[in-house]
Image (cartoon, helix red, strand yellow):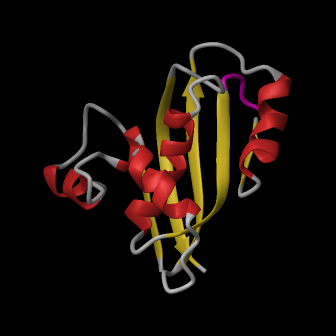
């Protein structure tokens, strides 16, 4: 099962907004620190999701930050595709739904503002592994 969305803040149907709202009431693209911490427990009873989040940043991210993500998390990786100021954060997370998995991945960025304190999520994807 694959869940994905290209996000446009000016054009999101109410049904899509509800679909991408985590149990803590936050839109997955805004991130949820509670979902991030829940996914860190790695409960084998929960489905495993392969998650990808594309986001833009207002300024270039230092190379050191790109490398620090893997060292800090171990579960996630951060890459910069060829487009300037566009980044891809990906990884695996155990969560009840794809929405929770995405909210947790973006929650990692929110919880670690030193990596990037001003970002906008443009696309999200969760694939049940």
- Vertical relation: 27 (above or below) 48: above
Where residue 84 appears, x then y in whole percent? 72, 23
Taking the image as drawn, is residue 103 in sight? yes
Where residue 29 appears, x then y in whole percent? 40, 43
Residue drawn at (56%, 48%) of the image? 53
Where residue 14 appears, x then y in whole percent? 14, 50
Q: How many labels does the image show?
A: 0
41 sits to left or right of 33: right
User: Where, quadrant-wise, is the C terminus in this rendering?
Assistant: bottom right
100 sits to left or right of 85: left
* Majority SS type along the magenta span: loop
Residue drawn at (26%, 60%) of the image? 23
Where residue 72 appears, x then y in whole percent? 75, 43
In the orientation shown, which residue stands out farthest toward the left?
Answer: 14
39 in magenta: no
Taking the image as drawn, is residue 81 in sight? no
In the orientation shown, which residue stands out farthest toward the bottom?
Answer: 45
Residue drawn at (51%, 59%) of the image? 125
In the orientation shown, which residue stands out farthest toward the top?
Answer: 59
83 in magenta: yes
Residue drawn at (49%, 34%) of the image? 110
12 sits to left or right of 75: left
Q: What stretch is highlighted in magenta?
A: 81-85
Asked whether 79 or 81 is in front, the reply is 79
Asked whether 45 or 65 is in front, the reply is 45
């Amino acid at each position: 099962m694959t869940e994905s969305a290209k996000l446009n803040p000016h054009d999101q149907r109410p049904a899509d907004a509800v679909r991408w709202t985590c149990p803590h009431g936050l839109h997955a693209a805004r991130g949820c620190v509670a979902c991030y911490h829940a996914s860190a427990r790695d409960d084998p009873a929960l489905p495993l999701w392969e998650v990808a989040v594309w986001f833009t940043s207002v300024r270039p991210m230092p190379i050191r930050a790109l490398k620090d993500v893997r060292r800090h998390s171990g579960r996630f990786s951060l890459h910069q595709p060829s487009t300037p100021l566009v980044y891809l954060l990906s990884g695996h997370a155990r969560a009840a739904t794809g929405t929770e998995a995405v909210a947790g991945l973006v929650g990692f960025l929110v919880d670690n503002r030193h990596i990037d304190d001003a970002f906008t999520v443009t696309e999200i994807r969760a694939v049940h592994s």
